[in-house]
Amino acid sequence: MTYTLNKIASDKTNTSAKRGDAIRVRLDAIHVVDGFNVRAADDDLREHIASIAGALASGFPIPPIEVYVDPESGRIELVDGHCRVQGYHEFARAYPEKFDGYVDAMKFDGTPAQRKARIVTSNSQLKLKGPELGRAYLYLRDEEGLTRQQIAQEVGKSLAHVDQMLLLVSAPDIAAAVERKEISTTEAVHLVRDHGENAAEELERRKEVAKEQGKDRVTAKAATPKAKAPSRPRVDLVVSNAVVLVNGLGAEEIAACEGPDDIQISVSSHALADLITAVREMQQASKPLDADRQEEMEL
């Protein structure tokens, strides 16, 4: 016998599902596949589930879940609506007299890869976090054999987005920090991209910087401050004074500078003083990128 959700609902001897305005499935007949859901059990998720249970208690409508029926066994597998199912369980425990044991369901027909991708495309209320998306894409790539381009097409995202989330979950320590809200997803991707296997060490350094700035989360602004580029007029002033200094040198001095030996030459003290002043003004207008640059610029 080949099972479908319609056949189960029409079968008077099978109580796993019954018909109403839509097909209604018994809550305890819904099978949640281990590892199928990619969400992390954090405070945001728990609050979202509690809000669903509260909505049910208040009589507000809840969108149907989506299920897949194994045609060989008749097992009803949850595809979309993990939070809603957990919300129903909380509602049932709190208000058993109000719950008849059934939930509205819609069938989902598709390949295993399409069922997995549905987790990404269906989340319109509580969005998936970067590491959760990355885990979904990782499964589609490694377990279902989809290419990066196929994953992007299946979930309706750009190829760059898929690559970034895969890069993020390639560094478990950084992905865990995102889930702990210690660093933003965007900054975490940049961190892994720029520092590779040293990303975790760099994250600890940036957390200290953020702490010194009075912040509890590493973002682009909370990371090491980027150098502010000197204004164009200040750069031009340095260049023009350097040109004056070079033009004041004779042919012999220039030849000596270009030679292999380190020797002393005479330069105009006034021209050198003007260049020193211009460089110092540029230093005051912007901070060098790092200590090495600071040492190079100090005179």
Image (cartoon, rainbow, N blue to C red):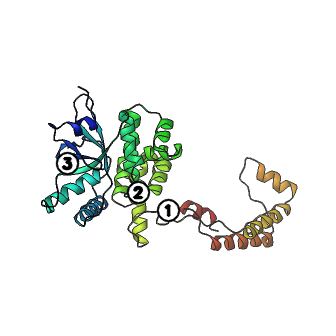
Give the residue number, with chain letter if any, for mark 3.
27
Residue at horizontal 29%, vertical 50%?
21
Tag 3: Cα neighbours inside 10 Å, few (<14), some, or many (≥20)?
some
Front position among marks 2 and 3: 3
Q: Are marks 2 and 1 in contact (CB under 8 Å)?
A: no
Q: Image quadrant for the N terminus?
A: top left
Q: Position of residue 263 (x, y in %)?
A: 73, 55
- Decide which of tag 2 and tag 1 comes sooner along the chain: 2
Give the residue number, with chain letter if any, for mark 2.
203
Mark 3, secondary structure of its residue: helix
Query: For the residue marked with disc 2, what is the amino acid?
Result: Leu
Tag 2: Cα neighbours inside 10 Å, few (<14), some, or many (≥20)?
many
Front position among marks 2 and 1: 1
Residue at horizontal 39%, vertical 49%?
122
Q: In which quarter of the image is residue 135?
A: top left
Query: For the residue marked with disc 1, what is the amino acid?
Result: Ala
Query: For the residue marked with disc 3, what is the amino acid?
Result: Leu
Would you say 95 lies left or right of 291 here? left
The CA span between labels 3 and 1 is 45 Å
Give the residue number, with chain letter if any, for mark 1.
220
Q: Position of residue 249 (x, y in %)?
A: 84, 60
Mark 2, secondary structure of its residue: helix
Would you say 241 lies left or right of 32 here? right
